[in-house]
Image (spheres, grey):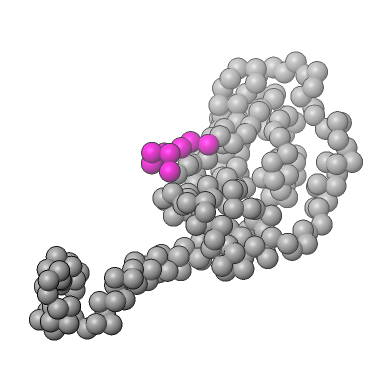
Amino acid sequence: MTLDEKLELIQEHQNGRSLNACLQALDVSKGTWHYRMRGGSRQAEREAMDQALKPKVVKIVVAHPDYGYRRMKPDLETDIGEAVNHKRLRRLLNQWDLALHRTVIRPKPSQVARILRQAKGHLNLAVGLDPGPLELLSTDFSEIPFDGGNRKAHLIAMVDVASDWVPGWAVGLSKDTTLALECWEDVVAAYGGFGHDVAGIVVHSDQDPVFTSYDWLGALVVNSA
């Protein structure tokens, strides 16, 4: 008989009988009885679950020190594959003093960010352009929910504006430069299949960090020149 079964049996038959006699008959200590009746086992289980969650939370805090619990919650749920109560997340952030990490000084903007800021309004090469096939590509990330909406994947596709042809796409769990470059490699290969060089084509995107990263710009501007 398990401990839980013994405790349940004592609860059922305690009325009218001595608690000590019941505990002695089933070889259960009084300390164990009072601990479990106060919810000690449930508390221990919750603490164990919280400690298992901590490395995941720390990972997000380090990667995104500016995230509050609202922005952190969907990323955490994607990582662990289950829903997280926002009140529990706020409590744990305060309990672990992780809120302090979000007060760190932000790093200086990259040189790319400075150029974009200085040239604001003059970098959209698609404005006024009447492109022919294979001359202008548009790209962005889209979210694809799955697992009943508890998780999400990220899709990036590059679309030829003139023909709606999709020369490259990639899907993965992380919205990052690696996924974007995987898509770009497909584009280069697809253009090569038509005997067409990607040098000189215009790629239109927003200023998502992926599209302003050195690796992405290096692949499009330097390596394709």
- Locate residue 2 relative to residue 95 in the image: left or right: left
Q: Is residue 107 above or below residue 51?
A: above
On the image, the x and y values in percent for residue 54 come to: 50, 65
Residue at the spot x=69%, y=17% of the render? 132
Q: Is residue 145 magenta?
A: yes
Q: Where in the figure is residue 62, as x and y percent of width and height?
A: 63, 62
Task: Give the camera-side residue of 46 and 57.
Answer: 46
Q: Quadrant of residue 64?
A: bottom right
Image quarter of residue 189: top right
From the viewer's side, name the closer residue of 173 and 66.
66
Q: Is residue 166 visible?
A: yes
26 inside magenta stretch: no
**Residue 214 drawn at (x, y percent):** 73, 50
Tell me the quarter of the image containing the N terminus: bottom left
Task: Give the image location of residue 80, x and y in percent.
Answer: 44, 55
Considering depth in this image, is 110 or 217 the residue closer to the camera?
A: 110
> Which region is colored magenta?
143-150
